[in-house]
Image: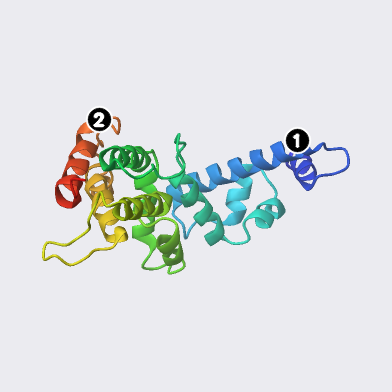
């Protein structure tokens, strides 16, 4: 199918059925995201243009601009998709068993930060942020290294455990801590083993995310620090 044919299909002409129209739109979106990610990583953010991405994705510039009106918007979509991970439970686990809940979220997070491309995108942001200030919005909202949707999921879960009385978040000097602060601690323990070494060593081979030892240790430290024993 030519670029013009795909554009006509995505525009939803009378000859196109709704299901076919939606399929073409999804194929175009996936192709754009894939082409953008590959070009950003190969050439850098600054040296990649939307016209180059449209050509690589085999869509018209009109189709690309209609969906992503700026390069920043497209880069945000690329990084947002990198944070998505198919998991069985999209919502936080129910409170009441912190070992199970932390283990569940921790393993999902280990798989997420070990995905091919995650370290490379983080490295790209760190490299180009000083000269491309518009990337700061992406770092702050969708791709901060220890955040993304998993951070929100963990924070909400920790809040629920605290309300249930199974966890008590106090600092070493007895001061209360927020669930967000504790979430950063937990994800940081996992991130330091799987992701951070990749940012400074391109030859680093991260551990297998299915290896339970790293997440188990992080969960054990969290429980020894914050469990109420109830």
Q: Between marks 1 and 2, how big is the CA–CA gap?
A: 41 Å
Total labels drawn: 2
Q: Front-most of 223 and 137?
A: 223
Residue 12 drawn above or below residue 88 = below
Residue occupying image coordinates x 34% and y 46%: 119
Q: Residue at x 38, y 53 (%)?
A: 156
Residue 19 placement (x, y as % from top left): 75, 35
Please name the colour scheme applied to the rendered image.
Answer: rainbow
Residue 94, picture quadrant:
top left
Label drawn at residue 51: none
Q: Is residue 187 left or right of residue 108?
A: left
Question: Mark 1 falls on what kind of element?
Answer: helix
**Marks 1 and 2 close (CB-CB < 8 Å):** no
Residue 208 lies, with reference to residue 225, above or below; the image says: above
Q: Could you tell which of marks 1 and 2 lies nearer the N-terminus? A: 1
Q: Which mark is residue 211?
A: 2
Which residue is disc 1 drawn over?
Answer: 19
Instruction: Name the element at disc 2.
Output: loop
Q: Nearer the viewer, residue 29 or 193?
A: 193
Instruction: Please state, as top left, top right, bottom left or bottom right, where the N terminus lies in the image.
Output: top right
Residue density around tag 2, few if under 14, some if 14–19, many if 20 or more, within 10 Å: few
Q: Position of residue 209 (x, y in %)?
A: 30, 34
**Frontmost residue, 45 versus 98:** 98
- How dense is the environment of label 1, judged by Cα within 10 Å: few (below 14), some, or many (20 and up)? few
Relative horizontal placement of residue 142, taking residue 227 as reference (left or right): right
* Residue 158 spot, x, y in % from top left: 32, 52
Compared across the picture, whether 7 is left or right of 170 comes to right
Residue located farthest toward the left when viewing the structure as drawn: 173
Nearer to me, 169 or 33: 169
Residue 129: percent from the left, percent from the top? 38, 64
Does residue 220 appear to the left or right of 6 in the view shown? left
């Amino acid at each position: 199918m030519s670029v013009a044919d795909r554009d006509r299909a995505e525009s939803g002409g009378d000859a196109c059925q709704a299901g076919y129209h939606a399929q073409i739109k999804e194929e175009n979106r996936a192709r754009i995201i894939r082409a953008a990610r590959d070009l950003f990583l190969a050439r850098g953010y600054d040296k990649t243009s939307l016209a180059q991405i449209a050509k690589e994705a085999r869509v018209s510039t009109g189709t690309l601009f209609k969906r992503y009106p700026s390069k920043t918007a497209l880069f945000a979509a690329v990084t947002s998709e990198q944070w998505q991970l198919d998991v069985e439970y999209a919502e936080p686990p129910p409170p009441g068993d912190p070992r199970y809940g932390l283990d569940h979220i921790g393993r999902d997070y280990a798989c997420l930060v070990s995905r091919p491309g995650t370290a490379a995108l983080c490295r790209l942001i760190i490299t180009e942020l000083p000269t491309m200030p518009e990337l700061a919005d992406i770092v702050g909202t969708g791709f901060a290294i220890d955040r993304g949707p998993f951070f929100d999921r963990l924070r909400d879960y920790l809040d629920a455990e605290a309300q249930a009385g199974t966890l008590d978040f106090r600092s070493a000097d007895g001061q209360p801590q927020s669930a967000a602060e504790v979430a950063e601690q937990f994800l940081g323990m996992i991130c330091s083993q799987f992701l951070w070494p990749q940012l400074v060593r391109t030859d680093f081979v991260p551990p297998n995310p299915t290896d339970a030892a790293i997440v188990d240790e992080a969960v054990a430290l969290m429980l020894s620090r914050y469990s109420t024993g109830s």
